[in-house]
Structure formats: C-alpha cells, structure tokens
Amino acid sequence: MNNLRNSVRLIGNLGMDPEVKEVGNNKKIAKFSLATREVYKNEDGEKVTETQWHNLVAWGNQATLAEKYLKKGNEIAIEGKLTGRSYNDKEGVKRYITEIVVHEILMIGSKKD
C-alpha cells in the first residue's frame, strides 16, 4: 500500500514537444505538458468538455525516451508522483508550481507517419 500514498496515473495528449536539458553529470531532464479531458452532461443536459493541463517532469531514462519518441499531440499514459515547489520570478515574487514526476511512460495512441 505504500506505493499508493502519492501515486498519479493519467492518460492524455501532449500539449508540447518535450523540452530536454542536460544537468549535472550527463543527467537529462524533460519537461512537458499533458492535457486530460472529461466529457459530461450538465444540469441542462448539454454536453460539456473540460480540459485539465498537467506539468510533467521526467528524469534519466524516461527523459531520454521522451526526447526520442514523444511529440506534441501524442496520446500517452503516465505514472508518477505529485510534487510541489516554489521559486522567485524576475520581479522577486514567490511562485508555486505543482508537477508530476514521471516514473513510467506508455505510448498508447496510434503511430503517425
């Protein structure tokens, strides 16, 4: 049950090509976004589509996989953990960001030419 304490699983489409950088001793980091979509009917019976955007971060082998195979629009499934961090922007204002650190990526959409 310990693996369930902070576990996130999502299926969606990439909103951008992964941005990959090398940090430290040949360690890679990839940052990208994932859109998930929920479709439901509201109180009036009208179909409503709601999209949520998620910030993803992948390290090491997962970053290499993202760099090599993932492109904007791809449908993927991910498993990871939810993390939060803060930073100071250019004006010195403290900003907060929530990200998902990706442990596993599965490409599930159809292969595009």
Image (cartoon, rainbow, N blue to C red):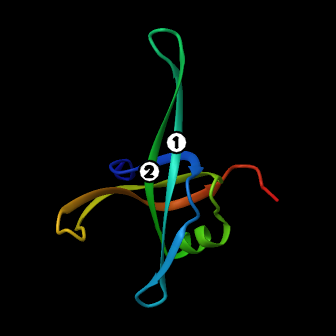
- Residue 106: x and y, percent? 62, 56
Q: Marks 1 and 2: in contact by CB < 8 Å?
A: yes
- Looking at this view, name the residue that lies furthest to the top: 44
Q: Which secondary structure lies at badge 1?
A: strand
- Looking at this view, name the residue that lies furthest to the front: 91
Q: Which mark is residue 76?
A: none
What type is the residue that disc 1 sits on? Answer: Thr
From this view, report whether residue 5 is shown above or below residue 41.
below
Q: Which secondary structure lies at badge 2?
A: strand
- Disc 1 residue crowd, few under 14, some 14–19, many 20+, Cα 10 Å: some
From this view, report whether residue 87 is shown above or below residue 9.
below
- Residue 29: x and y, percent? 47, 74
- Disc 2 residue crowd, few under 14, some 14–19, many 20+, Cα 10 Å: some
What type is the residue that disc 2 sits on? Answer: His
Q: Residue at x 53, y 60 (%)?
A: 104
Q: Going from the N terminus, do you reach mark 2 or mark 1 first?
A: 1
Q: Residue at x 53, y 53 (%)?
A: 78
From this view, report whether residue 13 is shown above or below residue 22.
above
- Residue 60: x and y, percent? 50, 76
Q: Residue tagged by mark 2? A: 54
Q: Residue tagged by mark 1? A: 36
